Amino acid sequence: MRQLVLDTETTGLDAAGGHRIIEIGCVELVNRKFTGNNYHQYINPERQIDDAAIEVHGITLDRLKDEPKFGDIADDLIEYLRGAELVIHNAPFDVGFLNAEFKKAKTPKAVIGDVCSVLDSLAVARDMHPGQKNSLDALCKRYYIDNTQRTLHGALLDAEILADVYLAMTGGQTSLLGEASSDSDNERENNLRRKSRKSRGPLPVVAASASELSAHAQWLDFLEKENGELPLWRTMSQGQSATD
């Protein structure tokens, strides 16, 4: 079984309203083993990025001006995804953006359901832990996954963390036949994760202006209303554990 743990970063929340993907990160698992055949791409969205979105991922339009446009990478991305099962946390969001991008690129038969299947890890987590917080950070805490590098959201980093969470949540580092991984297997998987993270460039950090801080506050209000739980920044300011 080939699975791709996928995450995206975007210019905003609404694909139907014209927001675009600016980063895609995928971690490949074959029979629940890390292969190192990962995919990571920044994308020039050809439009402004919402200030509230920059507060979340720290990626500015200036950072992306020399990156390829989605249409330039669409065919290669489809071939990478083809035949795999995508594991995505809150899959409708990312799938909606990917399908909107493929439509803009006018790529033949470029609909996610046509080239691969999708597993929503958020739906899995909600079934396993009803009534509990199931954000990625909450699951990291529940399954003792190290997410200390996650000071800002990033597609590849979040995909790497989600891969660890997914494997732990669905039975740990085991094969589909149920055999436990050997120490050498686990060490090889850990080395692949470390190599992948070392190869990733540093995430950009943007200092917030007064207007951006105001937009950030509005964004946090929205997140709190949508998710029914305090966002990370507010839990930290209250001296509580980060949950998002």
Image: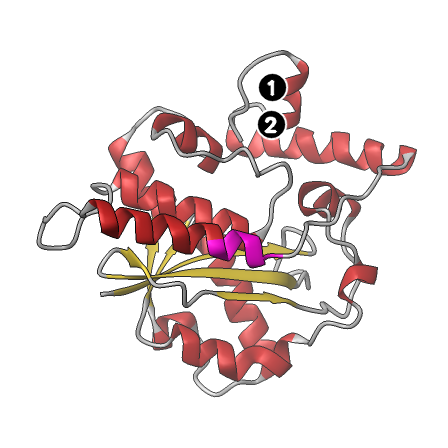
Q: Position of residue 127 (x, y in %)?
A: 26, 36
Query: CB atoms at circles 1 and 2 under 8 Å apart?
Result: yes
Name the residue nearer the viewer: 162 or 179. 179
User: Hey, what amino acid is under mark 1?
Assistant: Thr
Is 151 covered by the magenta stretch? Answer: no
Residue under numbered circle 2: 232
**Whole-number angstrom distance, CA of label 1 to CA of label 2:** 5 Å
Tell me how the rendering is colored: secondary structure
In this rendered view, identify the residue nearer to me: 117 or 151: 151
Q: Furthest residue to the right?
A: 210
Name the residue rendered at 84%, 37% in the picture: 208
Residue 235 spot, x, y in % from top left: 60, 19
Location of residue 206 with respect to 103 vertically, above or below: above
Residue at 51% over, 70% down: 99
Q: Which amino acid does label 2 sit on?
A: Leu
Percent from the top left, x then y, of residue 78? Answer: 45, 78
Magenta-drawn segment: 195-200
Q: Which residue is drawn at 55% across and 23% down?
A: 242
Give the image quarter of residue 149.
Answer: top right
Residue behind mark 1: 235
In the image, residue 176 sits, relative to residue 55, either above or below, namely below
Relative side of 136 to 85, left or right: right
Other-residue count near label 2 (Cα within 10 Å), few / some / many at <14 / 14–19 / ≥20:
some
Point 52% across, 60% down: residue: 25
Q: Is mark 1 on a helix, strand or loop?
A: helix
230 left or right of 78? right
Q: Position of residue 79 (x, y in %)?
A: 42, 81
Left-right relation of 89 to 34: right
Residue nearer the viewer, 147 or 85: 147
Task: Tell me the quarter of the image containing the N terminus.
Answer: bottom left
